[in-house]
Amino acid sequence: MGILDLANPTRFLRFVQIVLPWLAGLCVIVFATGLYMSFFTAPEDYQQGATVRIMFIHVPAAWLSMMCYSIMAVSSLGTLVWKHPLADVSAKAAAPIGATFTFIALVTGSLWGKPMWGTYWVWDARLTSVLVLFIMYLGLMALWRTMEDPIKAGKAAAILTLVGAVNLPVIKFSVNWWNTLHQPASVMRMDGPTIHPSILIPLLVMAAAFTLLFFVLHLMAMRNEILRRRLRAMRLKAAAQTRPASTALSPQAAE
Amino acid sequence: MDLGPHSGFIIASYALTAAAVLGLLLWVIFDRRKLEADLARLAEQGISRARRHQPSKGTEADRT
């Protein structure tokens, strides 16, 4: 099965059925390893103490919140430019997952901020731009719900998603462009990570676990969305089959 | 394992993350069960996705 064959929803569902159990199993193994390393092998930070353990979920969730939106932006291009049959399915399925990861990043960051910064929240450029991302996710989910036709909703959401993608570089570079309370990048840097390997490795393992979790949930949600559209198509067909009979019974038809 | 004086913040972070992920996972699983039950109910009523051969242009159902 080639990659282009997956454009067919039926073939995609077959692909999900084969891949999903393996991916879910791998996700559980990597999560177990990452959690063990986070709590039992990673040392306490010399400044943060044990609260560094919050970083093992906060940082991967924050990365995934942006990766998920990037996938939605690429899917939106697929909807508008290439009219790929699964592109808007992918974008719609990713939105609640992205919203959840962004929520986790915001809440865990807040819980880390209280003991480290002395406050749960500041209207700092990084925190505010991530909050905007969370609101964007909720807005897109609401937009999909307001329109009956999934094809029209997909196009409208694709335009909004691409407009909202402007926020991604703002989030990434906010710590460089503005004077923020949030620390600058310490992993993805031109001169290499500034974190000691004893903390960096558990962080990367947890990032891999979160990435696998995203793909597991995304495939499951895409499968649901395909089933939802099939259900809608069948209901429309059922309504079309019953319409002539009801028309025949109406008084206007009798006249 | 000693989580230090801020153990409450650490435990709350992991508990909220677990709750959010579990909630999402359960929502996806129950959504699928409901969709499959609805599809099975329509199939029992004799409504299938198979199209009658028509020379007209494609419908929305073609994309699903």
Image: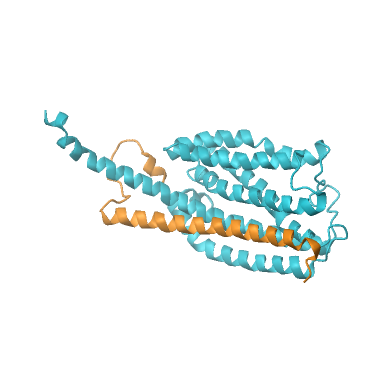
Chain colours: A cyan, B orange
- Residue A77, picture quadrant: top right
**Does residue B60 appear in the picture of this structure?**
yes
Q: Nearer the viewer, residue A181 or A161?
A: A181
> Residue A39, percent across and down?
75, 67
> Residue A151, percent across and down?
45, 38
Q: Is residue A11 rendered to the left or right of residue A116?
A: left
- Residue A169, picture quadrant: top right
> Residue B33, percent across and down?
42, 59
Q: Which residue lies furthest to the right in this view?
A: A46
- Residue A139, picture quadrant: top right
> Residue A101, percent across and down?
63, 51
Q: Which residue is at a point 75% across and 63% down the rendered structure image?
A: B7
Q: Which residue is at a point 40% across and 54% down the rendered structure image?
A: B35
Q: Is residue A241 rendered to the left or right of residue A145?
A: left
Q: Is residue A253 rendered to the left or right of residue A198?
A: left
**Does residue A1 appear in the picture of this structure?**
no
Q: Is residue A109 rendered to the left or right of residue A91?
A: right
Q: Which residue is at a point 63% across and 35% down the rendered structure image?
A: A164
Q: Does A103 sit above or below residue A76?
A: below
Q: Quadrant of the C terminus of chain A?
A: top left
